[in-house]
Image: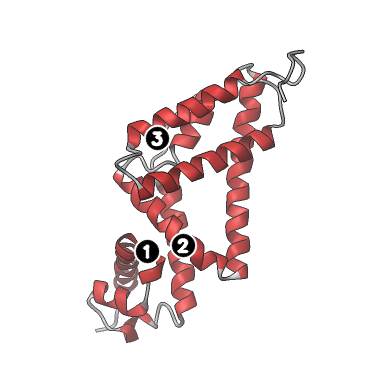
Amino acid sequence: MPRTKGDHDARRRDVSEAVWRVLAAHGFGGLTMRAVATELGATTGLLTHYFPTKRDLVTYALDLLDTRSASRPRRTAGTGMSAVRAALLDILPLTGDATVSNRIWVSSWDTALADPELSDDYARKYARSRDKLRDLVAAAQESGELPAGDPARIAAGAQSFVLGLVVQALFAPETFPPDRQAELLDDYLAALVSLPSPNDGRAVRT
C-alpha cells in the first residue's frame, strides 16, 4: 500500500521529535545519525532520506531550535521599561522549557563557530535580537523611563549581560535559580535607569 502525504508528515514529525530529544539529552555534541535513529527506533538508512549528510542533520537541528525558540510563549508587556524587562526575561532559563532551549543553544555555539557559514548566520541572529532590543530601549527613552544615550550601545550591553547570566545559570542552577536571575536582571535595569543623562550637567567621576 503506498504511503500517503499524511504518513510522510507524521514520520517527519516523529523525526523532528527524535532530533529534539537527542539535543535535549546530549546537545549538539551528541547529535549523530545513529543517536537519532536509536531514539526514533529506526535504521540510519531511513534517516538518509531526510538527512543525506551529517551537515544536513546539523542544519535541520539548528532550524528546529530556532523554530522552537521562536514559538515559545512570550511575556506580554506594554511599552517602556516593562517591555525591555519582559524581552530580557524571555531569554533567561526561568522554566524547564527555557532551560532546555538554552542548554541546546549553548551547545550549538561550538558547532556554529567551526563553520563560517553557520557562524555568520548566528551573528546575524544576535544582531537582529539586538536591533529589536534597541527599538525597545529607544521607546523607553522617549517615554522618559531611561536616560538619553545611544540605544544600540545600551541594547548591546543588555544583551551581553543577559547572555552571560544564561551561562552562569546553566552551569550553577543552584546558585542562580529563577528568582535570583530575575533579581540580578532587575538590579542591572535599575542601574541603567539611574545612569546620569549625558546632558544633565552632572560631573562624571574618573
Residue 80 visible (yes or no): no
Q: Nearer the viewer, residue 81 or 71?
A: 81
| Amino acid type at mark 1 | Gly
In the rendered image, residue 3, in percent from the top left (x then y), is placed at 29, 79
First reached walking from the N terminus: tag 2 or tag 3? 2
Residue, x 33% and y 65% (percent of image)? 26
Q: Taking 16 as reference, is 172 above or below it? A: above
In the rendered image, residue 17, in percent from the top left (x then y), is placed at 31, 63
Instruction: Assess disc 2: are there few (<14), some (14-19) or many (≥20) residues with their C-alpha within 10 Å of its C-alpha.
Output: many
Label 2, label 1: how far apart the Cα atoms are: 7 Å
Check whether the beta carbons of the residues at disc 2 and disc 1 lie within 8 A of each other: yes
| Amino acid type at mark 2 | Ser
Which of the 4 quarters of the picture holds residue 25?
bottom left
With 148 as the anchor, is 95 left or right in this view?
Answer: left
Instruction: Assess disc 3: are there few (<14), some (14-19) or many (≥20) residues with their C-alpha within 10 Å of its C-alpha.
Output: many
Residue, x 63% and y 49% (percent of image)? 127
First reached walking from the N terminus: tag 2 or tag 1? 1
- Farthest residue in the bottom direction? 45
Q: Which mark is residue 42?
A: none
Residue, x 75% and y 21% (percent of image)? 198
With 203 as the anchor, is 13 left or right in this view?
Answer: left
Residue 161 visible (yes or no): yes
Q: Taking 124 as reference, is 61 above or below it? A: below
On the image, numbered disc 2 is attached to which residue? 108
On the image, numbered disc 1 is attached to which residue? 27
Q: Taking 154 as reference, is 56 above or below it? A: below
